[in-house]
Amino acid sequence: MRNTPRIVTEMSQAYSFSRRAWMLGAAQGGVGLLLAGRMAWLSVAQNERYTAMSESNRVNMTLLPPRRGWIVDRHGVPIANNRTDFRVDIIPDRLRDKERVLPLLGRILQLPPEEVERIAIDLEHAAGFQPVQVAENLDWERFAAVSVRLPELPGVAPTRGFARSYPAGAAVAHLTGYVGVPNAEQYKKTHDPLLVTPGFKLGKDGLEKMLEAELRGIAGAKRVEVTARGKLVAELATKPDVPGKTARLTIDAGLQEYAARRLGTNSGSVVVLDTRTGEMLAMVSMPAYDPNSFSDGISHLEWQMLSDDDHVPLMNKVTQGLYPPGSTVKPMNGLALMNAGVDPLTRVNCSGAMRLGTSVFHCHKKSGHGPLDLKNAIMQSCDIYFYEMARRVGYNAIAPIARTLGMGQKFDLPFSTQRYGTVPDPAWKLKKYKHDWTVADSLNASIGQGYVLANPLQLAVMAARLASGRALQPSILAAQVHRDSPALAIDSEHLARVRDAMFGVINQGGTGGAAKLLIPGVAIAGKTGTAQVRRITMAERRSGVLKNGQLPFKMRDHALFIGFAPADNPRYALAVVLEHNGHTVRNLDTPMIGRDIMTYMLDRERALKSLAEVEPTWGGDIRTRMAATAETYRKAQSAPPAAIATKTDAIVPSDAPAVENATDMANATQEALTTPGNTVAEDDSRDRQP
């Protein structure tokens, strides 16, 4: 069938043309509306964005690190402050022609060849965005010489800013921590451009880390107008930085430095508290590292030296160290005995040893003390008295008083690493070891050995609570002092008896006579302590027990001391813990250290004079001894060039492997000494003074 041909008329043609024209016009109108809408969006809604982009093309802006807030002591004396610093860094991503730039930079700055080699090694190991330090603390002439030759030094970034400074050096290392260059992981978490700004450093450890938010401040910006090709046109107004806030501590900077020096060559710690408020006046752990050196960027060699030191200078012994408190717990145990109904005038005869089943528990005085009441048992540190009384009342009567006085307690302080020790009891042992508590456990715990562990801060709190009769809470930030602490739920007459016994320890023929103050009319009350770290076998006992001076360092007893003064109206309390001191050197032992530190609080000139007499015999002050140690280590190692390269990894002292190893070793020793049939008290518990 044939299709009928379509008839096209003039009218149909006109209609078809008009429809196409209308559709084309509508499409053109739509495109026009889209363009108009887009132009409106860009000019109105996106105005701020594109204005900023335009401005960024016209103006180059460089962040300026903010001035870090100071850390000051209770009197406003700076513990950590800032000094003007001319420094030069290299940004690896921007460095071009390293083989030409490094030698040229070395000549301009007059760097020794080994320092140029150190920079080259650091560049090989640095992240591309992470500034590599070339030199700090430059004089103006060398800094200006680099600045005027920048076109020849692509990637080199001279900066005029502020560097962190710790005037007391190692004396405050474990208190303040230090600042350092942010690492790659920290940058990846936030992508904050400030973290890759040359010269910027943040808190790495200690208070510097925990108070980072308050101390950091807000960055400033340097602005310059440039052409499209980057040519400088003019310098614009600089946006100033906002400095960080000042952190005021309860610490006394003078006391802090004095206590650090007075510890001498010991591995140990000191904590001093105000007995009215619980404010920490000193928190010292020695030996330590120099935070100024860490903030500048220490070498691998220096890190290895600190890690190899058997005195563990990387450890904050105040918060990370746990020790058997030894006889320092006897005043506290005396309170517990009286609270349990023991008459303080009841006498126990000390013959030098006590038999329990097939075991024999010894007193530190082989011939015995004879009959003693509570006061004299504390004064003479008689173990037999406390063995017998612990056997009678059980350790369940003692543990609650220990906790009341701060043992095993966690304190709210701005430190990331705290270990809290142990106040054992039958329930604790059953849960941890799946074994029942024994009478031998009570005997060990009664003299501060066995499962009992405490850190130096807890011992200082114990001394402060004994002195004040109040549940003091330690504080280190001046804005967070815990005032008006409630009274302890302990009979005031019992407290008075214990304080009198502690007075006798030092002033009435007790074991701590060396701690007697030399200030006329002022007395200190206290308690000495010795904590064993090894088992003394019966074979050794028969042949003669080795003295601490005959033993390797790690096998010597710990030495401890707690005290408060003035004895009749306590104002200050302290704890001194010396690792493996062994009571081997009289002027480096706990009683005389405690005496001199307390003297500093009451008669500063007398204390400084006493220190000046003995410090030269230890090899000089802290800085002198540290420099001598470093030089000796450097010569002994014959270190390769890579060893002087800056250590840039993320490990900080409180997390260092050396600290973990020391902790593991101490835990293993403690486990060995609490194994049934291998206890310290059964073998020998010594509280002898040299």
Image: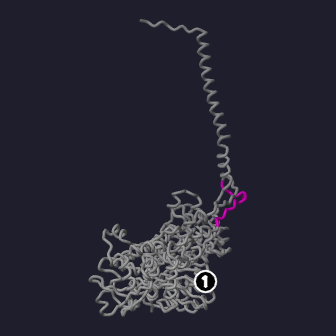
Residue at 39%, 90% in the rendered image: 371
Check if residue 242 falls in the magenta segment.
yes
Determine which residue is flagged by label 1. Answer: 601
Question: Chief secondary structure of the magenta span?
Answer: loop
**How many residues crowd around disc 1 within 10 Å: few (fewer than 14), some, or many (20 or more)?**
some
User: For the N terminus, which image quadrant?
Assistant: top left
User: For the C terminus, which image quadrant?
Assistant: bottom left
Instruction: Please state the horizontal and vertical placement of residue 166, each as a whole percent of the image.
Output: 60, 75
Picture quadrant of residue 45: top right
In the depicted structure, whether residue 373 falls above or below residue 409: below
Asked which secondary structure carries label 1, the reply is helix
What is the residue that sits farthest to the left in this orientation? 358
The type of residue carrying mark 1 is Met
Residue at 66%, 72% in the rendered image: 84
Q: What residue range appears in magenta?
A: 229-245
Decide if residue 414 is on the left or right side of residue 36. left
Instruction: Please state the horizontal and vertical placement of residue 479, each as a whole percent of the image.
Output: 62, 67
Decide if residue 89 is on the left or right side of residue 223. left
Does residue 131 appear in this view?
A: yes
- Number of marks drawn: 1
Picture quadrant of residue 2: top left
Front-most of residues 304 and 97: 304
Picture quadrant of residue 363: bottom left
Check if residue 677 falls in the magenta segment.
no
